[in-house]
Image (tube, coloured by chain):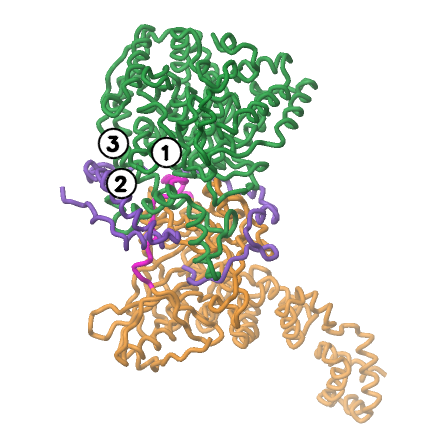
Chain colours: A green, B orange, C purple
Amino acid sequence: MSGHGAVSGDSLISLSASVLAERLHSGELSSVEVTQAHLDRIAEVDGDIHAFLHVSADALKTAAEVDGARRLGAKLSPLAGVPVAIKDVLCTQDMPSTAGSRILEGWIPPYDATVVAKLRKARLIPLGKTNMDEFAMGSSTEHSAFGPTHNPWDLERIPGGSGGGSAAAVAAFEAPLALGSDTGGSIRQPAAVTGTVGMKPTYGGVSRYGAIALASSLDQVGPVTRTVLDAALLHDVIGGHDEHDSTSLTDAWPSFADAARAGAASGSLTGVRVGVVKELGGEGFQAGVSARFAEALDLMASAGAEIVEVSAPSFRYAIAAYYLILPAEASSNLAKFDSVRFGLRVNPPGGGTVEDVMAATREVGFGPEVKRRIILGTYALSAGYYDAYYGSAQKVRTLIQRDFDSAFSRADVLVSPAAPTTAFKLGEKLEDPLAMYLNDVTTIPANLAGVPGMGLPMGLAPEDGLPTGIQIMAPAHEDARIYTVGATLEALLEQSWGRTLISQAPGHPSMPLPDERAARLEGGTR
Amino acid sequence: MTSTADLMDFDKALELFEPVLGFEVHVELNTKTKMFSPAPNPAAPGADASEPNTMVTPVCLGLPGSLPVVNEQAIRFSISLGLALGCEIAPTSRFARKNYFYPDLAKNYQISQYDEPIAHDGLVEVELANGKTFRIEIERAHMEEDAGKLTHVGGATGRIQGADYSLVDYNRAGVPLVEIVTKMITGAEHDAPELAKAYVSAIRDIVVALGISEARMERGNLRCDANISLSPRGSGELGTRTETKNVNSLRSVERAIRYEIQRQAAILAAGGAIIQETRHWHEDSGTTSAGRPKSDADDYRYFPEPDLLPVEPSRALIEELRSALPEPPAVRRRRLKESWGFTDLEFQDVLNSGLLVEVESTVAAGASPAQARKWWTGEIARLANVAAVDPSSLVSPADVAALVALVESGELTDRLARQVLEGVIAGEGSPSEVVEKRGLKVVSDDGALIAAIDEALASQPDVLEKIRDGKVQAAGAVIGAVMKAMHGQADAARVRELVLERATTP
Amino acid sequence: MPDTTPPPLDSAQVAHLASLARIALTADEIEKLTGELGVIIESIAKVSEVATPDVPATSHPIPLSNVFRPDVPGATLTVEQALSGAPERDGDRFKVSAILGEEQ
């Protein structure tokens, strides 16, 4: 990859996962060194960032085991020995898994999520669990029961959500790789506002087993990284069929890393039809976001891409459908938090029946946004309202799929800004749920249709100097196409900037953290 | 719990009202694993679920992140059952979530089927003792999962009311169930209680013949909820129905229906109204008590289960399963009656006792049909009646066949065999183990018998004289004395043979 | 097209929804939610504008069917694992307060 090593000096933590992997493989670096460097970085900056809810006590031990195996000549997978942060929505047998909720505080699952098991099998080093909006409900990570995460670009701003912890951890060089989950944009939107790369795979491309469910028909686990190639390498590790997840696809997936390398090497988009979705831009989009997006389109056109405008009229109903389907499924998925088998139990004053205990536990254990959505979902499924709400939303889903089908008949990939604005200030939208919901306007259609989408950096907005992101979507099963086009675009953009976007971050290891770090909001950091 | 309900005389109730019935029968499938998880199934043959929470996976406990995957065998069994019930098999059926909170329901929703069940519109023919045949229409048969088991601790009754706390065991959570729902059944009249029993018995025969359930009602493998309402004669109006739950023996089904008819009739005749509610059957008192009222608060918020995909059985699979179906019940009954050589009366006796499956299994285990029938409809039915349970819950067909074999080989007399049966029922082991433990074997050691005979003859010289004079009937006194000395554990015919031999031997 | 929009939400309805969802909301929360949800529902109710009878519903983004598992027993949790997260246990069973409602 051009540029990465050059701008970051010799700081170990600034290296991409693919470079780390090469140096681990060659013996130039040990996993213990790499892991220790990231643990040091976490110790140094996470008090300000608060990306992590839990840091693994076993990381160095695991790293030493991988180093030992390598010395003995064991055949190791490409990312063996590279540290990875794990969103707290994923079950880990050796670390608490809370999904950012008080109701699961301290819960250590008796099993690993399939993706976590795959990380261990490929001998990556789990560094810890990252912060998130409670049960992944939110676009700012402010709804975490354990305090917000801060955007490394500006500590007074949100890192996006729900996977703000994973995005911030990667953006702040606390981890080279992270796992996220994306129900309506929780991987792609944080990527956009932190200047990182986030991929939501085709629905069913990555196992959901052990991912604490928000909305089962929308949730998808995916990689959060600083480069397209790193995302592809991590996707190669976590993807593939899982017999524990009925919705898991049986596709014979190609190597996404090969797809990304091919894209970066070609530097050309000749013959690629890039569809610009008319409905995912314009009004409501920050000027600097729109400007950077226009430049990215020009750059793609200059590299040979055919830019076509496509229309997806049903997308204007996507947020409405999403905020019916998600709360409905979530209201049912979150019923299991009842104080019987795991998690918090709150006994009401003077005792009470098990019904009282459940109700008191859920009142205390869930935050306001979770309660809001559970009540909304309960309403949407209620007798007499099902057809008007949930039933109608499922029909909108069909219309959105048809719009995608039609758009993909004219374009190989679709593009839009990955988020309508740059990172907003902490607290700015907390009291206005509807405004918060609009952050996912560009990302939600892909979840409703199950198609893959990636958010990647497209430059800093001139007005605030904060990162913007572009979203690339492809038809279902065509994740590799995104990696190819994404890696090409990434290379073109970096050539135009003369460096990576992330190297301009104020928290970049080659630069000091901004002075404003002291002025962070209170209550959020550990 | 005591019942203070007034009851109307059954015949009187039938004069005033027409009973309308409906049944929901839950069948636990005997697959090796659960419906949605590879945990071993407590309803499988020979499964031991006595240790709580030992047959669970994250799926059974509804742990965060866990996901269901459908058991293929449960689908095949459900299709076979649907076909045997004469149902249409849906080309597409779907699972749905039924949402309600209860501590035995791990996820606080039950995965069931709602508007797209796997089988619908079937027909079951039921024959009564009086020869009448009823055609019971099946509305639907759908797949779902069982819940865990609650134990209520404290309070006087061990029941939920008045308990101090409850304990939950999730071994049963996720056991595959098929729920069979009938359409409304009218015209049963006085036969309603017997029809109820005959229907459940017919379902049991079907699932046993298919081999898809252990079908032990006392273990909850087969559970019946009975809906009953009374319609004032000539009114043409449907009454309010109650749903009686927890009816877990064939005998109870019959009694519960009879009781509810009498109870409802008394209330209606006194100008009262029936409350739409679930009622709980109490085996001990033979009564029902009020349970949960049905109300608007019941809002299960069904929606398609997003973690599972539609079930779309191919035509080929359905035809494969159809061709493997056992013969229809009526054909089967005719065949068994013929092959067993029973008279109409004998066969009806077996049917009315609901013991067709038991007799058939006992014959299959090696007993003669006559002996199998004799034991099941005789001694076992008598003991079951005393214990107020179903005969099938007392002893297995294999044990009955073993008992018959011991009698036929001369190792046991009928009288000893009855004692052995009691031992088997008391859990002392198999018949041969009980014989061993209780020392009940017939004395077939001629030496011991001859010694006793010689002693008896010596003490009754006059009898010896008579026998030698050809008055053979005089031997009875000696035989009696010998049997007494042997504590009855001797074969009387053999004793007689030996007495005559010893008396005439110089 | 007939107007199928349900009537606006009131606080009694929110209280009922909270009881269905087993959350002991405070009176203040019910009031606040009634207002917030009213606004949200108004904006999302527009789905019914385009959800005409001729449009089929989509419940799964990627159409699959007949995904089954062979009937082969797999690994189970140990009793200790099963009960490891229990807020309260009694022997090898989960312990809960007395139950008010009947089984369903």
Task: Please name the residue shown 46% across and 61% down the image.
Answer: A352
Q: Position of residue B506 (x, y in %)?
A: 86, 83
- Neighbor class of circle 3 (other Cα within 10 Å; few <14, some 14-19, many 20+) is many
Question: Mark 1 sits on what residue?
Answer: A427
Q: Position of residue B139 (x, y in %)?
A: 32, 56
The image's mark for residue A399 is 3
Q: Main secondary structure of the magenta part?
A: loop
Between circles 1 and 3, the one closer to the viewer is 1
Q: How many marks?
A: 3
Q: Position of residue B178 (x, y in %)?
A: 42, 53
The amino acid beneath tag 3 is: Leu
- Neighbor class of circle 2 (other Cα within 10 Å; few <14, some 14-19, many 20+) is some
Residue bounds of the magenta highlight: B294-320
Do marks 1 and 3 share a chain?
Answer: yes
Left/right placement of residue B80 relative to residue B169 reads left
Comparing C13 with C3, the one in front is: C13
Q: Is residue B277 magenta?
A: no
Left/right placement of residue A88 relative to residue B244 reads right
